[in-house]
Structures are given as C-alpha cells and as structure tokens.
Amino acid sequence: MAAADHLRRTQRAPALLVGHSLGGTAVLAAAHRIPEARAVATVGAPFEPAHILRSVPRPDGLDAGGFDADGTAEVAIAGRPFRLSRRFFDELEQHDLGARIAELHRALLVCHAPLDEVVGIAEATRIFTAARHPKSFLGLDGADHLLTRREDGLFVGRMVAEWAERYVGADPLAVAAPAEGLVVVRETGEGRFTQAITAGHHRLTADEPAAVGGDDSGPSPYDLLLSALGACTAMTLRMYADRKGMALGPVTVRLRHARVHAADCAGCEKREGLVDRIERVITVEGGADEATRAKLLEIADKCPVHRTLEARPVVVTRVEG
C-alpha cells in the first residue's frame, strides 16, 4: 500500500497489481485498499500468509538461533537469504485472506508452476476457488518457484501483459501514439540498452545481445534495419506479382549484415578499408524459372527501403531539452 501511495503521489496509482510468492499474497490482501487497481495477478503465491512458516522455522526457535538485538533474523526462503523482523512473523498469522479474495471485486490471474516445491500447486487451487469471476489460471509447466530460467520469466511477463490489457487497457505510462510517419524510440529503464519503439499504434522492443552488455529482450538496431529491408523486399515483390498476374508462391527473404574488407566485396565501389555488406537471399516457395528469378532480382532492387539505403540519405539531428 505504501508503494501504491508513492506512485499515486509521483506518477499515478497502479491499475494492475502483480505479486510473486508471498508478494502475491500481499497484493491480494492489499487490493481492497487500492481503489484504482482493476486487476490482480499472482505468481507462485500461497493462499495464507502463514504458509511461509511451514518451510521457515521461527527464528526464536532452537533451529534458527533466535533474533538479533535489533529484533530481526536472517532466514532462507527458496535458497535465498532474507532478513525479517519478529513483527513480520507475528503478523503473518493475523490475516484472513480467504475473505479478502472472495471480496476482491477485481479480475484475477493465478499463475503457478505445477511442480513448485516451495509453494505447492494446492495453494493456487485454494486462491482460484475462493475468488469470484472474472478469474483465470495459467499453468507454468517446467518452471520453478523463483522462475530462475529466463524464458519462464519472460513467458509470465508476456502472458500477464496480454491478460491485463483486457481489464486495464494499454500501458498507462506509454507515450501517446505518434503521428503517422513518426517513430518514437525511448529508453525503458528495464535494461542497459532496452528501447521501446512506438510506430503509430504498434509497439516494438529493441535491445543489444547479451554478448555486448544487453539483455537480448528484442532485435538489435541492425536486426531492425534488416527486417525493414526484408519486409519491403517481400512486399514489393508481392505487389509486382499481383499487378502482373504472376503466380508467385510465398516469398521468404533472408538477410545478414557484416563489415567486410572492401577488397573482398564484389560489386562494392569502395576498394579500401571496411564496407557494410548486406547479403539478401530471396526464396520463392514452389520455385521459379530463370526468367522469373531475373525479374525478381530487378524488382527487389526497386524496393523503397533498398533505394533509401543506396541513396545515402541525409540524417539531420538536433537535441531538445
């Protein structure tokens, strides 16, 4: 609730609450105190806050060695150390979460791994059964409690986002859709290089590979460049085929960018130093005769993005603010 109050003061109150493990139990308990929240998603959450006590002995017991002078103790939960207070343990037993869930009055998504060894799947069943509609369940097959595999975390993130949009709409902090023809790229703050790209009503993500310090959460800038050329090539070929009544099978364009020595680049005007070389391979399902292949090569070079790249466009830059 303190976090929601802070967001209410500094940005806007959260419309979606997401909690993992005991954090999921916490958002279920707090949702009724956050009126702006319209949807709640839990991941690996226990039904009762006191569930945590089953796997973590109270620090004032003989097994854990008691509390420190400041009233806190370090305990291990799912293999990770946490420093918790005596008050924390005392308050865990004071919540009636079943009543809170029954009166949630918000859309609920329960995400849980069937083989979760920290919080059993039965806890998810209790949450789901206590809740009223609208409610949904997402099984996280193969995941562990902490979602230690990157692909599991990304899967949960994508699914929660898709589900939540039905109830809370698009990202309320996203910039408004730019005017037609304008592309906006902004840092997300989620990674060192992660960028959110808005083109009209479309949202994309760009990043750098992990090998160069990124999170690999989206295509790199050069991947996007090749994607633009490939898409434009395929679209141009399809428009030509349709206009000419040509029976052309599905087109696939494969592209690769590299910096090569000019001396090794056949067809490059520059003969010294390094040059950018884009290899483009066009495949037509079902094949094409020699005359058709020759014509496709000619038309591919007329794709507008291809022409823009060859024209060496002037980029005018200014810094605002």
Image (cartoon, rainbow, N blue to C red):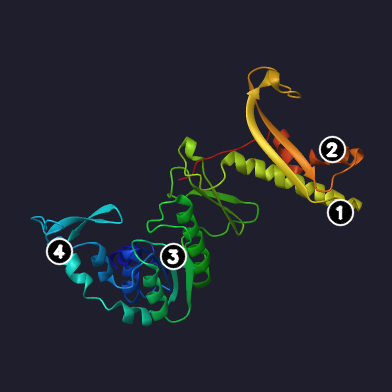
User: In percent of the image, x 48 and y 73: which residue is there?
Assistant: 136
Q: Quick one: label 1, few (<14), some, or many (20+) residues within 10 Å?
A: few
The correct choice, above or below, for 117 with respect to 107 in the image is above
Can you identify the residue that label 2 sits on? 298
Label 2 Cα crowd, 10 Å radius (few <14 / some 14-19 / many 20+): few
Outermost residue to the left:
69
Of the image marks 2 and 4, the number of the one nearer the N terminus? 4
> In front: 167, or 60?
60
**Amino acid type shown at disc 1:** Asp
Q: Earlier in the sequence, mark 1 or mark 3?
A: 3
* Picture disc at residue 242: 1
Asked whether the viewer can see residue 105, the reply is no
Q: Which mark is residue 23?
A: none
Query: Would you name the residue on which mark 4 appears?
Result: 86
Mark 1 and mark 2 lie on one chain; the one further toward the N terminus is: 1
Three-letter residue code for mark 4: Arg
Work out whether mark 3 precedes mark 2 in sequence or the reverse, and give the earlier one: 3
1 and 2 marks in contact (CB < 8 Å): no
- At label 2, the amino acid type is Glu
Cα distance, mark 2 to mark 4? Answer: 76 Å
Relative height, residue 315 to residue 164 (above, below) = above
Q: Are marks 2 and 4 in contact (CB under 8 Å)?
A: no
The mark closer to the camera, 1 or 4, is 4
Asked which secondary structure carries label 4, the reply is helix
Residue 206 position in % (x across, y down): 54, 46
> Which residue position is annotated with label 3?
114
Q: Secondary structure at mark 2?
A: helix
